[in-house]
Amino acid sequence: MILPLFRFAPGCVLLLGLIFPQAIHADELPLQISTESRVNGRGEVTVFLTLKNTGDKPLFQIHPMFHFHHTDAVVPMIPKLEPQQSMTLENNDHPAVMRAGRYPLVVMAHYKKDMDPLVFSTVLHTDSFYYQEPVESVVDGRLESSIEPSGSFLNVLLRNNSQALKNVRLLLLLPPGVIAESFKGMMGVTLQGGERKYFQVPVIKAGESMSGSYPVHLLIEYGEKLKHYSGEIRGKIEFDPEWNSQMLAFHMAVIAVMCLGLYWAYRKKWKELLNT
């Protein structure tokens, strides 16, 4: 009876793959975003935004939005982008920068993969530009994800690589459907010279079907000696698929019934072969 057991095992493995599919990563998106920023001598900023459909199907109702230096700006909607088509938009609806230094730029675009009125996808793009002097932030760090029995956590490490005190502002950018109740909007943090600061951010998902890995961005800004500094830390947040007891019992029952059916089918076939 060992041979029939080996023969029906691949069928059970296939069933497991169908019932417990692999998660699709959130960064597998067809809309590609790039930006080019220009600043004149008066600190006036112009941003050229290029949107490209890298997929093989049209995209619809693309709504780009800028977040720049604590202000938001919305550009006109693009009704449709054909496969491999790109479009460049110009935007100068931003306040002039006053301090020399580096500034962060965030673009978020909502779009539809079909004409379903309720289903939108979102892509996030981050960039930066400098005015007069390309200064670099001395505050950096690391983002790591951990999954614990109580849920998913974003582990944040900040490092002040100078000997001077820094009062920094933090902005956590999360993909749609991912929520950090304890970290909404800007957060202020004081770092002594050479200090390393670590804290955890509980993160929850709005959709039960969300699983896998999602990109996150932590923007860092601070001012010093009439100059503006900014930096960015990138990471990922991980989610495990959620299975409550009823769902798990149902799926395990389905697996058991189907595997049992395969076993008896192969057992019958094996007996027929022995009798011939």
Image: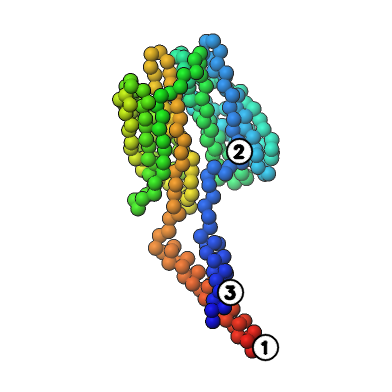
- Residue 144 location, quadrant: top left
Residue at which label 2 appears: 31
| Dots 2, 1 in contact, CB < 8 A | no
* Three-letter amino acid code at the position of disc 1: Thr
- Residue 181 location, quadrant: top left
Q: How many numbered marks appear?
A: 3
Residue at which label 3 appears: 7
Residue drawn at (38%, 17%) of the image: 224
Residue 37 % position (x, y): 57, 21
Give the side of residue 22 with respect to residue 145, left or right.
Answer: right
- Does residue 63 sit above or below 97 in this rendering? below
Give the side of residue 248 with respect to residue 46, left or right.
Answer: left
The Cα–Cα distance between marks 2 and 3, rounded to whole angstroms, is: 44 Å
Label whose residue precedes the other's in the sequence (2 or 3)? 3
Q: Residues within 10 Å of mark 1 (few under 14, many from 20)?
A: few
Nearer to us in this view, 36 or 10: 10
